[in-house]
Image (tube, grey):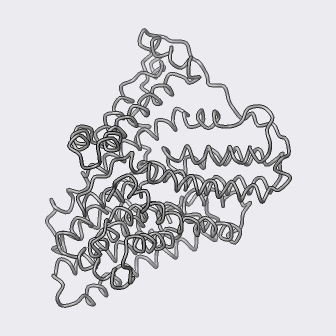
């Protein structure tokens, strides 16, 4: 439950403190118990790794320590337990997926800092007079669209004040619907792109690490698009039913804001200022938009070639090797540090050119997730080397009793949906995506569908107010009780549990990911 304590009441803070202390007690006891209960035919490194994973999961689930601290400490403890050498344990922190997330996070931070997300959200709202139903739909669709490229909590922090402000005119029912729309659609929208949620990248990394499959980023979107469309359509249908005839009420929907235009001060800025005039964005926003669109084009280029020539064709492999997503993301982010955005007066009173993104601003990204990704990859890599993954895969297949790819995808999606309600999406995916891959290998079926199902389902955490930071922010408004959020969230969880495995397996077969 990676939730900022800012949004918790005093009673909830006391409960969280007890929960953390309990985690500090249970984690070592769990690790020792697992180690003692390991079968005799398991190697010592594999048994030590299994105990380490169990203790690490307890610390992550209870947040007894900050997520980043646990992520750094776990590989260190693994070295002391003889699982692997320091070089082998910490090398996965430099995995390309980590750098893909890092570059994408810098793009997200720049868009937030320059308020590009606000400009995009304003463009998606209806202009002039509209109906209450369409206004709720616009808020929901804007939340889903922004979450495809931005962290969910940032989108929630942007959209919820709009809902709260408009509720003064339209009442409590509109406010509750708007808040649920933000909570649900930010979770759904994050599934649309591989960089929309950390769990998506964990799923791609698990396929690469455990099965040697490199899934093009475009193919992730092709697989996820029907899922996202169906889930968002479900929410809009429920909102329409709840509003009833009142949804046709005519309201003023012009929520746009004018983007400020600043005069150019140098030749470089004068040239850059010609683009925002056409797009309605200021210079910094325009640079971020161009760089982001360029990164998307390069990320999706290998997928386009794969669709035309085949996933396993020489042309697709050549283009994919020439355009590593992590390298594209880092170089795109580097451009933001060099591109000028305007003039700023320093403490001495002199004018200096201000970059689109400074390092002081970039340092505000979620470093906990970066470290958590690296730790998950490190533990996963060692599970292969020690043989633990094969043992876990055999145990999972035997325990779940599944015999088909669809059955395994459904089981993994169900486990992810249950676990992510009480744990972060990254932790859930780090646990279940590798398990999905090795279980599929035991069944001799393609692991892509089950792994992507686990990754997507890990992001659908809408059942409890403290499932995600988005839900915690909503809970802080005190307009929805725990019971109300859970009762309504069941619809989203059940729908996701049915749609994600069925559509993921079918779309993987359709786009050639087998």
Q: Is residue 461 left or right of residue 339?
A: right
Identify which residue, 412 or 47, lies in the foreground: 412
Residue 443 lies in what quarter of the image?
A: bottom left
Looking at the image, which residue is at 83% across and 52% down? 171
Q: Position of residue 510 (x, y in %)?
A: 40, 55
Residue at 35% over, 83% down: 30
Q: Is residue 358 left or right of residue 230?
A: left
In this view, 33 is above or below 166: below
Counting from the top left corner in percent of width and height, residue 129 is at: 81, 34
Q: Is residue 346 above or below residue 256?
A: above
Viewer-closest of 82 and 203: 203
Residue nearest the viewer, comparing 300 with 324? 300
When the figure is inspected, residue 322 is found, relative to residue 272, above or below; the finding is below
Can I make out residue 64 in this image? Answer: no
User: Residue 133, percent across and down?
Assistant: 77, 48
Q: Quadrant of the C terminus?
A: bottom left
Q: Is residue 250 left or right of residue 400?
A: right
Using the image as rendered, state which of residue 303 and residue 345 is in the foreground: 303
In the rendered image, residue 43, in percent from the top left (x then y), is placed at 15, 82
Q: Is residue 246 visible?
A: yes
Residue in the image at 28% along x and 39% along y: 327
Which residue is drawn at the image coordinates 24% and 62% (left, top)? 211
Query: What is the number of callouts on the image?
Result: 0
């Amino acid at each position: 439950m990676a939730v900022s304590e800012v949004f918790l009441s005093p009673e909830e803070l006391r409960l969280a403190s007890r929960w953390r202390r309990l985690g500090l007690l249970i984690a070592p006891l769990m690790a020792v118990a697992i180690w003692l209960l390991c079968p005799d035919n398991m190697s010592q490194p594999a048994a030590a790794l299994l105990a380490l994973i169990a203790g690490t999961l307890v610390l992550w689930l209870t947040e007894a320590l900050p997520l980043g601290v646990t992520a750094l400490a776990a590989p260190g403890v693994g070295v002391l337990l003889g699982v692997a050498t320091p070089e082998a344990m910490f090398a996965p922190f430099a995995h390309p997926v980590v750098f893909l997330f890092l570059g994408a996070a810098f793009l997200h931070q720049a868009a937030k800092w320059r308020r590009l997300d606000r400009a995009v959200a304003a463009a998606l709202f209806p202009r002039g007079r509209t109906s209450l139903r369409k206004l709720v739909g616009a808020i929901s669709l804007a939340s889903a669209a922004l979450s495809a490229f931005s962290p969910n909590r940032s989108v929630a922090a942007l959209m919820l004040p709009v809902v709260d402000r408009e509720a003064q005119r339209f009442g409590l029912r509109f406010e509750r619907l708007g808040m649920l729309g933000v909570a649900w659609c930010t979770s759904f929208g994050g599934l649309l792109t591989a960089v929309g949620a950390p769990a998506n990248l964990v799923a791609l990394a698990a396929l690469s690490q455990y099965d040697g499959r490199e899934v093009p980023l475009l193919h992730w979107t092709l697989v996820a698009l029907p899922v996202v469309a169906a889930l968002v359509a479900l929410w809009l249908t429920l909102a329409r039913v709840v509003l009833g005839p009142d949804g046709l009420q005519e309201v003023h929907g012009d929520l746009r804001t004018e983007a400020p235009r600043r005069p150019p001060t140098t030749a470089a800025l004068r040239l850059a200022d010609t683009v925002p005039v056409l797009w309605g964005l200021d210079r910094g926003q325009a640079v971020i938009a161009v760089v982001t669109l360029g990164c998307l084009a390069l990320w999706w280029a290998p997928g386009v070639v794969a669709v035309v020539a085949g996933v396993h064709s020489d042309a697709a492999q050549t283009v994919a090797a020439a355009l590593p997503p992590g390298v594209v993301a880092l170089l795109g982010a580097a451009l933001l540090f060099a591109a000028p955005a305007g003039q700023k007066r320093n403490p001495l009173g002199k004018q200096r050119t201000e970059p689109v993104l400074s390092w002081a601003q970039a340092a505000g990204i979620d470093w906990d997730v970066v470290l958590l990704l690296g730790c998950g990859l490190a533990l996963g890599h060692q599970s292969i080397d020690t043989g633990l993954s094969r043992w876990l895969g055999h145990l999972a297949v035997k325990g779940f009793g599944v015999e088909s790819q669809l059955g395994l995808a459904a089981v993994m999606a169900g486990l992810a949906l249950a676990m992510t309600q009480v744990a972060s999406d990254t932790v859930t995916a780090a646990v279940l995506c590798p398990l999905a891959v090795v279980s599929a290998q035991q069944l001799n079926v393609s692991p892509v569908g089950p792994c992507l199902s686990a990754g997507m389902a890990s992001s659908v955490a809408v059942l409890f107010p403290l499932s995600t930071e988005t839900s915690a922010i909503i809970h802080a408004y005190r307009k929805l009780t725990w019971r109300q959020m859970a009762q309504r969230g069941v619809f989203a969880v059940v729908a996701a549990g049915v749609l994600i495995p069925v559509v993921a397996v079918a779309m993987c077969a359709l786009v050639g990911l087998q």
